[in-house]
Amino acid sequence: MSTIGSTLTRTKQVGVGARQLHIAMVAPPYFDVPPKAYGGIEVVVADLVDALVARGHEVTLIGAGKHATKAQRFITTYDVGPADQLGEPMPEMVHAAKVASILDTLNVDVIHDHTMAGPLMARGRLTPTVVTAHGPVRGDPGDYYRALGGTVQLVAISGAQRSSAPDLAWAATVHNAIRADTFPFRGTKDGYALFLGRFHPEKAPHLAIDAARAAGMAVILAGKCSEPIERAYFSREIEPRIGADVTIFGVADAVAKRDLLSRAGCLLFPICWDEPFGLVVIEAMACGTPVVALRRGAVPELIVHGKTGIIVDTPAEMPDAIPRALLLDPADCRRHVESGFTVDVMAAGYEAVYNRTLATVPEPWLVQGQAPAVN
């Protein structure tokens, strides 16, 4: 369904120089938007929706479960998101098929898809589709995005992600962001280090235990441990390391996460893969908590070394980095997020992508092979 005409009509209504868009925002199918606990993509989507609405756009949000956003319309594909099937292909496939049917009934200007399977339905669509690549883009995922070709406008979430597959047809790079004012700032910290993330070999929380123990600091580990690979990793690497200086918190909901982050002396981010972003890093800094991280993926784009955290090259360097991080000014951490990772900056970035994309779409009568009516 072509919707360029609706864009032109609304442009006339809101006045010269203004361009109000109707955006169909497609979230993944597993969690509420925003999620109650785990679900980084859904957090970003929720904040983006609210920021776009605040900028005068109309947003129809398509997702799973419930939402607590400012979207003018919410359409769900699952009454309860199948969180227990996270990582399995079928929920994504069902979601994509339902979304395609929903989009056939909508008159929107642009579709913004945050899923993996959904972009497959973009081929042959007249309404342009913007896709944010939230995960890795090497190997099979890279081949997938290459096969999509010009059917979508592909957006990277970091320069590191984009440079890992420079041959992809990238339309832009837009950093993720958070609402810093929803994270409590605390200048005085408690005496523990924090790991917050999945219990997964790529996230390597066992390295957080080793580093904190070597630095003589207690450590709290909070995160998801439900998938088979996560449970196996926990049994193999975490259980043998548990001692009096290690607290296993479990999954932290939005309230608990903010409390843990604000009170921690530092966040440990010992990733063993090239993570495209790392939302928890800017969440920690928003709370005034410096980050000790391995130099992988987007880490150097997020942390100002020696000011908002300490970046090291090997796990062996992490213990010495911890006391250095504890000396950093929490206010500098907060200011860094408030100046560089705001939701308004993120929304403006995507708004520019939408407008550039629409500028390249032919008028509907050109696509349909007929001249416009003359009044």
Image (cartoon, grey):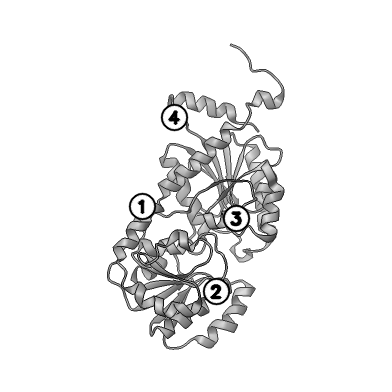
The three-letter amino acid code for the residue at tag 4 is Ala
Q: What label sits on residue 230 in the rendered view?
A: none
The amino acid beneath tag 2 is: Phe
Q: CA distance from mark 3 to mark 4?
A: 33 Å
Residue at the disc numbered 3: 29
Q: Is residue 108 visible?
A: no
Measuring 42% from the left and 88% from the top, which residue is drawn there? 244
Relative height, residue 235 to residue 130 (above, below) = below
The residues tagged by marks 2 and 3 sit, at their Cα atoms, a distance apart of 22 Å
Q: Is residue 204 above or below residue 164?
A: below
Instruction: Answer with mark 1 or mark 4, whichever residue precedes in sequence.
Output: 4
Task: Identify the amino acid type marked 3.
Answer: Pro
Which amino acid lies under the numbered mark 1 shown in the image of this protein? Ser
Task: Categorize mark 2 by other alpha carbons within 10 Å: few (<14), some (14-19), many (20+).
Answer: many
Q: Which residue is mark 2?
A: 199
Q: Residue 262: name its quadrant.
A: bottom left
Location of the N terminus by quadrant is top right
Closer to the eye: label 1 or 4: 1
Other-residue count near label 1 (Cα within 10 Å), few / some / many at <14 / 14–19 / ≥20? few
Q: Nearer the viewer, residue 195 or 62?
A: 195
Q: Measuring 47% from the left and 48% from the top, which residue is drawn there? A: 48
Mark 3 or mark 4, which has the lower sequence index?
Answer: 4
Could you say which quadrant of the image residue 140 lies in?
A: bottom right
Residue tagged by mark 1? 339
Circle on res. 18: 4
Element class at badge 4: loop
